[in-house]
Amino acid sequence: MSKRHDMKERIQQVALELFTEQGYDKTSLREIAERLEVSKAALYYHFKSKEEILLSITAGVVTGMDELLEWGESQPHSREFREEFLRRTAALVSDQLQPLIRFVQANSTVMKNINHEQHGDQARSRIRRIRDLICDPEDSLSDQLHGFFALSVLFVGPVLANLLSLEATADQLSEASLAAALEIISSRQPLISTGSS
């Protein structure tokens, strides 16, 4: 990884932390630079505004999801694939999506300027692609629900744990969510076919 790319990731991480801690509107580029211990000019070299930083973070999450879906769509549909898909999804959620979800929870009004209709259509398309990876058309309704429940645990498990004030680190919540998702998926009926769907 290049130093420039590494610096951009550090800026994104620190900015997201500050946006979540004290609010997007109340955070300045100067404060981001100070926490990074760099000059404001050095920060400007990578990002000209807070909006640029935020857009780059959301773009990174979308890219990560698209790469996961492309990988999944190239794999044979099997129980082993579904378990690996859950593991990779859990890693994406833990590394990229959960910090963004925490930001959204703390800054709900900031998201008003986003084109929700376009993003909503794209999100629905990705959900359908996930559905096609985790469920076979021949699956019973019960098995399809098991697949969705497993995925839901990965996405909402850590958030729910925070709401319930469970004492655990982010890593512990991520591991527990993955364990629960794998347990749910393993309770499905065995796949009859292991060929490509």
Image: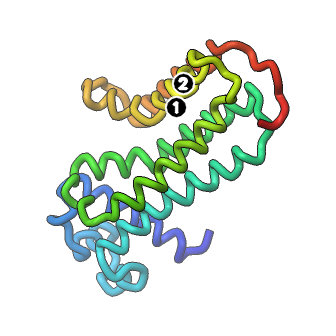
Q: Comparing marks 1 and 2, which lies closer to the viewer?
A: 1
What's the amino acid at mark 2? Ala
> What's the CA distance linking mark 1 and mark 2?
7 Å
Question: Which secondary structure, mark 1?
Answer: helix
| Residue 185 percent across, percent down from the top left | 61, 21
Q: Quadrant of residue 80?
A: top right
| Residue 190 percent across, percent down from the top left | 74, 15
Please indicate, yes or no, whether residue 124 appears anywhere in the rendered image: yes
* Pointer 2 residue: 181
Q: Quadrant of residue 113?
A: bottom left
Left or right for 31, reference 133: left
Q: Which mark is residue 55?
A: none
| Between 119 and 98, the one nearer to me in the picture | 119
* Pointer 1 residue: 151
Q: Relative to 159, is 118 above or below?
A: below
Which residue is rendered at x = 46% and y = 28% of the image? Answer: 153
| Residue 69 percent across, percent down from the top left | 64, 49
